[in-house]
Image: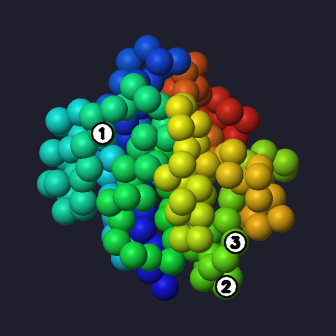
Amino acid sequence: MMISAIIMASGYSRRMKRDKLFLEYKGETLIQQTIDKVLQCDFSQIILVAREREILQLGRKSGISVVENKNADRGMSESIKLGVAYADDCDGYMFFTVDQPLLNTSIIHKLLQFFWQDKTYIVVPHYEGRRGSPVIFPKKFKQELMALEGDVGGKVIINKYLDEARFVEIDDEKSLFDVDTQEDYEKILQAGGIGYDV
């Protein structure tokens, strides 16, 4: 089974009002944490899509493939399309954002196992009715992914093909917590700030 991991790191962190890729959690930046976790998992290829030179250099230093996003202003769809276009032939694509510092490799492995059981389904992590990331798309959705436009992600494809999606229940709510605002960041820095010990 060959799965390409695509790390999307081209955003402008507008809600955060500063670049969240360089925020630190437990002594490491969010971007480095994400790269490290993905490297610990069984991917045939790891692709980092970014617009900043420093992030691209970090990817190269980590030994993963990098793609410069020169049109990041077009929104999230551009990162998705660049990652998919650069990927080698594979069974599926697993998309990672860089704002989930509490995501752990056991969750990633659980999602991969569900995909390995049937590589025709979209695999989506789920906690008490709320969807999260990372999501795996089978290669049969390549053209749908390449057709995305604007600041939209794979959610529109999931909604269109709900009967072809597997929602995998995650028993660890905090692993899906994403850092979008300064308030979110402060929550993960304060133990118990989001209803449990971080």
Q: Nearer the viewer, residue 48 or 190?
A: 48
Q: Nearer the viewer, mark 2 or mark 3?
A: 3
On the question of residue 95 being in view, the answer is yes
- Residue drawn at x 73%, y 35% as measured from the top left: 195
- Picture quadrant of residue 87: bottom left
Q: Which residue is mark 1?
A: 69
Vertical order, 104 against 23 (above or below): below
- Residue density around tag 3, few if under 14, some if 14–19, many if 20 or more, within 10 Å: many
Q: Nearer the viewer, residue 124 or 139?
A: 139
Estimate the x, y position of residue 36 in percent, counting from the top left: 34, 58
Estimate the x, y position of residue 70 in percent, counting from the top left: 27, 34
Say what amino acid the circle numbered 2 marks. Gln
> How far, Cα to Cα, is label 2 from label 1?
33 Å
Q: Which residue is mark 3?
A: 121
Ranked by sequence position, the earlier of labels 2 and 1 is 1
Q: Which residue is mark 2?
A: 117
> How far, Cα to Cα, is label 2 from label 3?
9 Å
Ranked by sequence position, the earlier of labels 1 and 3 is 1
- Residue drawn at x 53%, y 32% as measured from the top left: 150
- Residue density around tag 2, few if under 14, some if 14–19, many if 20 or more, within 10 Å: few
Estimate the x, y position of residue 108 in percent, counting from the top left: 55, 65
Q: Nearer the viewer, mark 2 or mark 1?
A: 1
Q: Are marks 2 and 1 in contact (CB under 8 Å)?
A: no
- Residue drawn at x 49%, y 37% as measured from the top left: 76
Q: Is residue 144 left or right of residue 26?
A: right
Q: Are marks 1 and 3 in contact (CB under 8 Å)?
A: no
Secondary structure of residue under mark 3: loop
Say what amino acid the circle numbered 3 marks. Tyr
